[in-house]
Image (cartoon, rainbow, N blue to C red):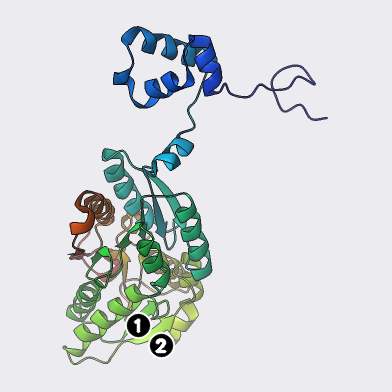
Amino acid sequence: MVNGGSGPPGERRSRPAGIKAVAARAGVSVGTVSNVLNRPTQVSESTRARVLAAIDELGFVRHSSASQLRAGRSHTVGLVVLDIGNPFFTDLARGLEAEAAEHALSVLLFSSDGSAERQRRQLRFLEEQRVEGVLITPVGDEGSDLVRLQDRGTRVVMVDAVGAGRHCSVRVDDNLGGSLAGSHLIHAGRRRITYVTASYAVRQCRDRGTGLTAAIASSGARAPRQVEVPTLTGSAGYEATARVLAQRPDAVFCANDIVALGLLRGLLEAGARVPDDIALVGYDDIEFAATAAVPLSSVRQPAGQLGRTAAALLVGEFADGGSHVHEDVVFSPELVTRASSGGVMA
């Protein structure tokens, strides 16, 4: 037999003391203990002190989730992002959690990994937990699950996505971001530009590509070619190196920094000089961009501010009740130029 406790073999670990044991130790009713925990002003100071001493003595821990469910409130919200391995979403989650904490809200974090089925299971779990709201960067444009969730009374805020009038949303103008990257590369004298991206079914990739194409078209240069990767990961960027080089570009714009950093490694291993032979621009401006072997130019998104704003929108829905009007908050990105595109170090 494996001894799972710290006592002698065969000794059973005691269960945490319950509210009845606290009431017995303090010599009061269970209702009085409940009042001390939930409505302390309704209990005399001497009785409250006796109950708190019993709680401390017995090591009682209240079952907050059960009491919250009985009250119909959980003081918890769920955050579902596309890929927690991407530092952009990590920074976004930090900002969101900081704002939520100021309103006494806890955050349950999930990563859908781009899977619609995984996202569906996560939303179902959050609904079962009676969370007060869900903040989500959804997979694709599918919104039926979110509308159903909202119809059942759970507030929904779209993060880095478009609310389409059905939900509050906060995002960055990705069309502008792609345009900034394209204009920068054109002004740097680049004319053979390749866009490395995931499927255009991903709204962010589509908008960034649209902005890039428009900026290049306005200069009269050839429309950008495209290399599609299965996922927006460093390994996908690295494995795309041969396909990128086969197009003989003099510049590459990547849909995010993680892909760009993977491609950068592949280009350097292949003997390409960055930026002399090929200029490179990413998107997000994650922390690692500035410390890459060749510091990476990138379109910066205010990830922490996106997260904070998303949480504030959700809190606003709680406060406004039936009078709430959905908002679509759009931030403007900025281009940070570094050595990878021949820019000044930032």
Q: Say which amino acid is labelled 2.
A: Gln
Q: Which residue is mark 2?
A: 247
Q: Which residue is mark 1?
A: 194
Is residue 346 something that shows in the picture? no
In the rendered image, residue 28, in percent from the top left (x then y), is placed at 46, 13
In the rendered image, residue 333, in percent from the top left (x then y), is placed at 20, 65
Which residue is at a point 42% across and 80% down the rendered structure image? 199
Instruction: Judge the density around disc 2: few (<14), some (14-19), many (≥20) Cα neighbours within 10 Å.
Output: some
Q: Say which amino acid is labelled 1.
A: Thr
Q: Quadrant of residue 275?
A: bottom left
Q: Is residue 134 left or right of residue 19?
A: left
Against 334, is 68 above or below? above
Against 191, is 173 above or below? above
Which residue is at a point 52% across and 61% down the rendered structure image? 121
Q: Quadrant of residue 73?
A: top left
Q: Are marks 2 and 1 in contact (CB under 8 Å)?
A: yes
Residue, far right: 1
In the rendered image, residue 129, in percent from the top left (x then y), is placed at 47, 49
Disc 1 secondary structure class = strand
